[in-house]
Amino acid sequence: MALAVFGGGPPPSAATLAALAAGGALLLLVARALLSFVTGVLRHRRIPVPAPPESSLLLGHAGTLLVDTSPLKMAKWVREYGPIIKVRIMNDTIVMLTDAAAITRLNRLPGIYKPNLYRAFDLPSARNPSLFSDAGSPYQKDAKAECGPTSSFATRRSAQAVRAAIAPCFSVSSLKRTFPWLQRLCQLAVAELAAEGPRGPVDVSDLAARLTSDTIGDVLLSKDLGAMTPQRSGAQEGGAGDATDYIALVRQLLLAVHAKMNDPFYSLRRLTAKGRAHEAAFAAWDSVMDSIARDVLKTTPPEYTLAGHLLRVVDPTTGKPLTLDKLKGELSNLYIAGFETTSHAITWTLGLLAAHPQQQDALAAELARVGLAPSDVHPEPRPFEWGDLSRLPLLNATIKESLRLFAPAAGGSLRALPCDTEILGYTVPKGTMVSQPLFSLGRATRNYGQDVDEFKPERWISGGGDDGAAADGDKPKAELPDPLPFSVGPRDCVGRALAMLELQAVLATLVGRFSFALPPGVEGEGVAVLEAMVCYHITLHARNGMPLLVTPREA
Ligand code: HEM
């Protein structure tokens, strides 16, 4: 054979043959990459949806989208090009949808599924997808009927089993069980801020992260992770570890997940120092979760906790309890999803109130009326009670407005289409990824009017009756679409009720006791001050924390 190829000369050495084989394989790889790039670009061109200009032929829109301020850029595109646009990252097209009604319809479509990109969240050792990354949809059978039989509908029912199992943890009765713990954490936060005294700015993002981490510690494991009381941390009690370390590790991890999900050269970058740091973040978190999962299997947390519910799940694909790897993946996602976004929501809201003293005064007045802020009648504010949840319309409007302006899950949901689908008058082909960037949705003038970039909680409070004009906005309240910070549909945020409870309790307690102000030297005013801090790595956070001046309120 070798003679036939090389003519009459001596047979080639093994090294030459190996080099030829390697060269051939490389050529094949390059040809495949080129082919998938060309088909990707052609597919992109055929999708009949408006597109902003690409920054390069090779990368498409990647150059613009992969920077950590991308939500701001995306919001501008949405204003310019409308509620449905397409972008390209090399050979992948993503359709961006920011119309709340269209998103609501789409996320409930039979067979709509989560694309593979979510697997970037999975731990290296947790080989099975978790609730967060599993493509499964409860409507898969219907989708087969609608789109015709297709092999792409792997029936992944374990996500549904996990979701159904943990959902009761967010019911009213379960939240009432957690509530005294949350009240205690709020009081610890008050004591901590009061003890700070007039020593200059306090980073409220750090406080918010520790408080929400200790809340999910209770809901997940019934453990005090000790971030609000480091001297009694779980690590010292032989418990789940030190939550302040977890918070730092999760920050590194989300940077890595962001890169894995968005950077087309992630695999190559593993060879660089930055890439190695990302891989190290995955490995470090994996090892933390491994010991927590083993601890859960050994000690069996109470039935009412998320971990307790997970232990009782029977995986429908195996008929057995979740494996250690799967348990690890679920615990990891529930911990991260359970504290990260909520802590950013608290932080952005305090920042917005600091940048808007008038709105902060109005909120403090509402809190004072019910005894949650000092007044002549109640010089010493009382703790936040369960009954307050329905008593504070301005607080609820403030939270809604903050989640609209600074959606913590700024990139929103990603879904893939099971069939060719009509969206806002365009036929988008089967398999296309549809992203729902929630930051852009909240900032679209089409949705919220010309004052969209202003912080106006009162826009959510009608002038008279529910269909009346928004108190001070340029669009009637009845026309304002829901900002969807928790997404929508069967794979929306399962922990929404817990997040809302934390936001209400923490913000009412802190704003009732303290006034918050921007520190001297901060330039600009209003929402723009906070936009300058935007940093997006999977979640939207303030780049260098949120240092605010904190002063105790007086009657
Ligand atoms: C302000 C706080 C929060 C925000 C803005 C938020 C937002 C979201 C969004 C937008 C999604 C959908 C993601 C997607 O479709 O790709 C989601 C999913 C999820 N969230 Fe939250 N979340 C918050 C708090 C929480 C809390 C407290 C938990 C409690 C554990 C939680 C657990 C989850 C889980 C497990 C999922 C995946 C659900 C599934 O795939 O079926 N989240 N969240």
Image (cartoon, rainbow, N blue to C red):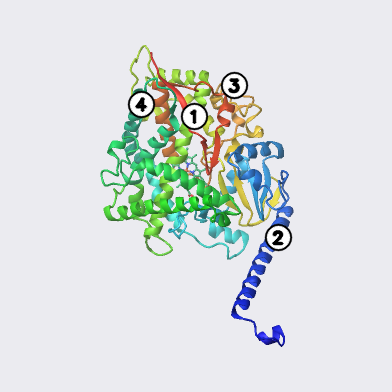
Judge left or right: residue 403 versus residue 298: right
Q: Which residue is mark 4?
A: 190
**Picture quarter containing residue 525?**
top right
Near mark 4 (Cα within 10 A), the count class, few <14, some 14-19 or many ≥20, is some
Circle 2: element type: helix
Q: CA distance from mark 3 to mark 2?
A: 50 Å
The amino acid on which the numbered mark 3 sits, given as a three-letter code, is Asp
Inspect the image, locate mark 1, and give the three-letter code of the amino acid beneath it. Answer: Thr
Mark 1: give few (<14), some (14-19) or many (20+) Cα within 10 Å. Answer: many
Measuring from the top left, give residue 374's x and y in whole percent.
37, 16
From the viewer's perspective, is residue 458 above or below residue 2?
Answer: above
The mark nearer the N terminus, 1 or 4, is: 4
The label shown at residue 244 is none
Helix, strand or loop status at disc 1: helix
Regarding residue 431, the answer to whether it shows in the image is yes
Task: Kindly identify which residue carries mark 2.
Answer: 39
Furthest residue to the top? 376
Of the numbered discs 4 and 2, the one sitting upstream in the chain is 2
> Which one is earlier in the sequence, the residue at label 3 or at label 1?
1
Distance from disc 1 to disc 4, alpha carbons, whole Å, reads 17 Å
- Which residue, given by chain and number where applicable, does mark 1 sit on? 349
Task: Specify the amino acid type for callout 4.
Answer: Val
